[in-house]
Image (spheres, helix red, strand yellow):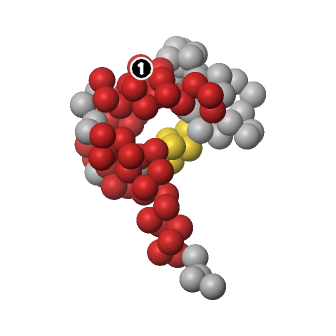
Amino acid sequence: MGISFYPPFVHQETSSLNKLLDHFVHVAEIAGVEHLGLGSDFDGIDQTVDGLDDVSCLHRLIEGFSARGFSPKETEQIASKNFLRVIEKVLPKE
């Protein structure tokens, strides 16, 4: 599941980095870190979460994972490994 960074999906009133991190923690608790990924939607959204203006700001989110208790391995899973695993599993090997 890629968590969207679109502010109205993050919170109706305040779309902060902390609110976005709340979503990551919640999904990790319910579904497990192995089912979690980034779904920034930077290519189609007309608003951004405060502090995550574009891809150059992703380090703030990554740092937030650590602050919320995600291990380096879990952070790597969320940031890329989970999507790579799924892509390798579903796409043909040709």
Q: Which residue is mark 1?
A: 18
| Number of marks | 1
On the image, the x and y values in percent for residue 38 come to: 51, 43
In the image: residue 6, left or right of residue 77: right
Q: Using the image as rendered, state which of residue 16 and residue 69 is in the foreground.
A: 69
Nearest to the observer: residue 47 or residue 38: 38
Crowd class of label 1 (few under 14; some 14 to 19; many from 20; radius 10 Å): some
Amino acid type, mark 1: Asn
Q: Give me the residue at 44% from left, 65% from top.
A: 85
Identify whether 36 is placed above or below 71: below
Is residue 85 positioned above or below 36 on the image?
below
- Which is more toward the observer, 94 or 87? 94
Residue 7 visible in the displayed image:
no
Q: Position of residue 51 (x, y in %)?
A: 56, 17
Residue 11 appears anywhere in the view: yes
In this image, 93 relative to 34: left or right? Answer: right
Q: Which residue ends up furthest to the bottom in the rendered image?
A: 94
Relative image position of residue 92 (x, y in whole percent): 59, 82
Residue at the image position 63 percent from the left and 32 percent from the top: 55
In the figure, residue 49 lies in which quadrant? top right
Please identify the quadrant where the C terminus is shown.
bottom right
Q: Residue at x 58, y 76 (%)?
A: 91
Q: Position of residue 83 (x, y in %)?
A: 49, 58
For numbered disc 1, what is the local secondary structure?
helix
Tell me if residue 37 comes above or below residue 91 in the rendering: above
Instruction: Please report the residue visible at 59 percent of the width from the left and 38 percent of the height from the top.
Output: 40
Residue 89 falls left or right of residue 64? right
